[in-house]
Each structure stands twice: as structure tokens, then as C-alpha cells.
Amino acid sequence: MDESPSIRSVITSYHELNPTVLDELAEQPTALDFMRYVSTNRGFIVRRGAKDWDALRKWDAAYLRDAMKGRDVKVAVTPHGNADAVVADEAGRLLFVEPYEVNEPFETFLSVVQEDSRSQDRSRGRNVRYAQTQNGNLPFEYANLAGDVPTHIAFATEALGQDPDAVNFWLGNDRSTTSLHKDNYENIYVQVRGQKHFILLPPIEMPCVNESPLSFARYRPTEDDGEDLVVETNKDIGPTPVPLWDPDEPELRPTVYSKYSKPLKVTLNEGDMMYLPAMWYHKVGQGNGDEGFACSVNYWYDMDFSGSFWSSNAFVRDVYNASLTSVSYPALDMQDE
């Protein structure tokens, strides 16, 4: 496929006009200042912005075990920590694979995460566990912890005129990753234990990420071994566009525009707060805290679909898709066979 000068220009001009780092603020912004960032779809970091949260003082392993004693939680299980990721099946076909999910006591889950982190042999094949239900789980599944964090982020609630649509609790270790994706939420993210490592791409880089329709699949255990996971296609869900390009592997499945991408790399430490604007692509990794786990909380606020932002992004996507000619990726060509 040949480059379109117009598509190239819209990407390069964006980067000429915008820095390739996020602003770092000395304190949480006012509602007015926050709205200025929302209006330009640019993120920021507030180092130690959550330093006064009770969770920052309390959430060690002993406290979490005691607070969640007797409660089962839903846990994502994958062979390599690659939940919600692009995976090639045995035939080489690319699929969007969701994790196998189990319900287990929180104490058991946390112990497995910690033991896995401390093991000297990280290649022994143990499945990776991650609490990542992302369905507003904190006030419900993790209700015993909800009182340790705010119910909302004051500056965001005032600026956006709404409460968060979901507040989520996340816990795992450094073997868990989340592949490149985007969300139609204004996201306030706070790291409580360990670190989070983000790779960020602005929405204008849609032509760089090689979004392609992939069939859904899910990991499932084999009948004879609950720890041995295989991929099973879910034929009840139609294909959905998924980024195939990974900024960490820039030579693998790029588009002609991928070379114009300027990924932002951000690490959040304990107590740090980040605003991740709606529709930004992000890939996420983790670093273990002192006790062998990482945990965080995020607040999802519905984005505003009025105005030009949503329509402008849809226009870039439509222009890019219209520019596509026959591109041969063998793994994709097999999808309907």
C-alpha cells in the first residue's frame, strides 16, 4: 500500500504541534484546568497525587488478606500473562483471545501471585493470574476495600458533570500485560502498589496500529489438566477491529504509517495519578512492589460524543480504511476458512 500524503500529514503535523511527553503537575488540577486537558485530549501525571489516600497506607498483603477474608473474586488466567491479546492459533491464524476466568478465594489468588513473583524459575509454565474484571468491580466484588479510596475524583466529577461510570480494582504481578487497545472513557488511573508501565499513542495514530478484524477466542482448560490452557474460538461473537502492531515490536505487522508513530512511555509509581484521555491507545505492563504484587485503581468517566472529537477520529479511520488496497497477511487471510 502506498502512503497517502494527507494521512501522513495529519499524523506528522499532530506531532509537530504536541509534545511527546505528558505534562507533570505538582498537584491535582482544578476542574477548570482539568477541562482544558480534556478539551485538547492530552493527558497528565500528578506525582504522588494520591498520597493522602488511605489505600496508600493500608494496602499491604496482610491488610488485603484480612479485609477480603472469605470472599471469592473472579480471576483472569492465561498461560503467558497475555489477557485480551492477539494470539496465533496452531494454524497460524490471528485471534483476539480473552482469558479463562475462575472464581477463587482472594487469599488464594494473592498467595499465588506473590509466589509466582518470588520464584527463581519464571519459565516453568505456571499460568498467570490477574484481577482485571474492569466492570466496576471495586464497589461490589471488592466492597471491603472501597472505603479506602475516594468514590470519585473530585476535579473530574465537577468538570465532566457526572460520577464515574465504573471504578475498578486491579491486582497482579510483572508477568501480566495488557496489549495495545483504546477505551471510550476519560480515565483517571492511580497506582497503589508496585508500578505500572504504559506505552501511549494518541488517537490520531490510528493508521499506525494496523487495526484489523479478528475473531474472538478464549482460553479454556483441557479436559484432563486444568492448568493446561488451549485457545477455543467463540463463533457467537463477530470479528472486531484490534490493533495488530505493537510499538515494542515495530517490525512486526506494521502499516506504511507506523514509522511516524511517536509512542509515549510512562511509569507510574506508588501514589502517582494519571489522566489518560479517551481513545488513546495504551499498552500496559507492571512492576512488582516490595511484597511481590502490583495493584491499582482507576475511574472511568464516559467521554462526550458531541462536538467534533469523535467525528474527527471516525473520519481519520474511514479515510485510512478507504485507502487500503490488497494487503497480504497470511494469518489474516485464513480467518474465514
Image (cartoon, rainbow, N blue to C red):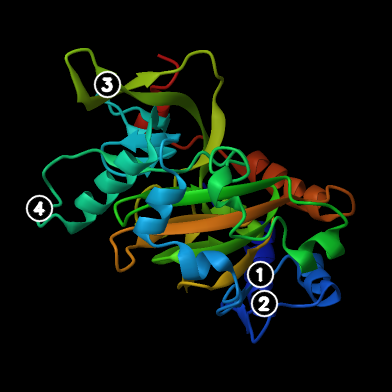
Question: x, y (%) of residue 30?
Answer: 80, 77
Q: Which residue is mark 1?
A: 43
Q: Earlier in the sequence, mark 2 or mark 3?
A: 2
Q: Earlier in the sequence, mark 3 or mark 4?
A: 4
Separation of residues labelled 2 and 1 (CA atoms): 11 Å
Q: Nearer the viewer, residue 183 or 116?
A: 116
Q: Which residue is mark 3?
A: 221
Disc 3 + disc 1, Cβ < 8 Å: no
Give SS at disc 2: loop
Question: Which three-letter amino acid code belongs to the residue tagged 4?
Answer: Asp
Which mark is nearer the camera, 2 or 3? 3
Q: Nearer the viewer, residue 181 or 256?
A: 181
The image's mark for residue 121 is 4
Q: Which residue is mark 2?
A: 18
Q: Earlier in the sequence, mark 4 or mark 1?
A: 1
Question: Which three-letter amino acid code belongs to the residue tagged 1?
Answer: Gly
Disc 2 + disc 3, Cβ < 8 Å: no
Which mark is nearer the camera, 4 or 1? 4
Which mark is nearer the camera, 3 or 1? 3
Separation of residues labelled 3 and 1 (CA atoms): 40 Å
Which picture quadrant has residue 224? top left
Q: Earlier in the sequence, mark 3 or mark 1?
A: 1
Which mark is nearer the camera, 2 or 1? 1
Which picture quadrant has residue 269? bottom left
Separation of residues labelled 4 and 1 (CA atoms): 38 Å
Question: x, y (%) of residue 305?
Answer: 83, 47
* Residue positioned 54% across, 38% down in the render: 141
Disc 4 + disc 1, Cβ < 8 Å: no
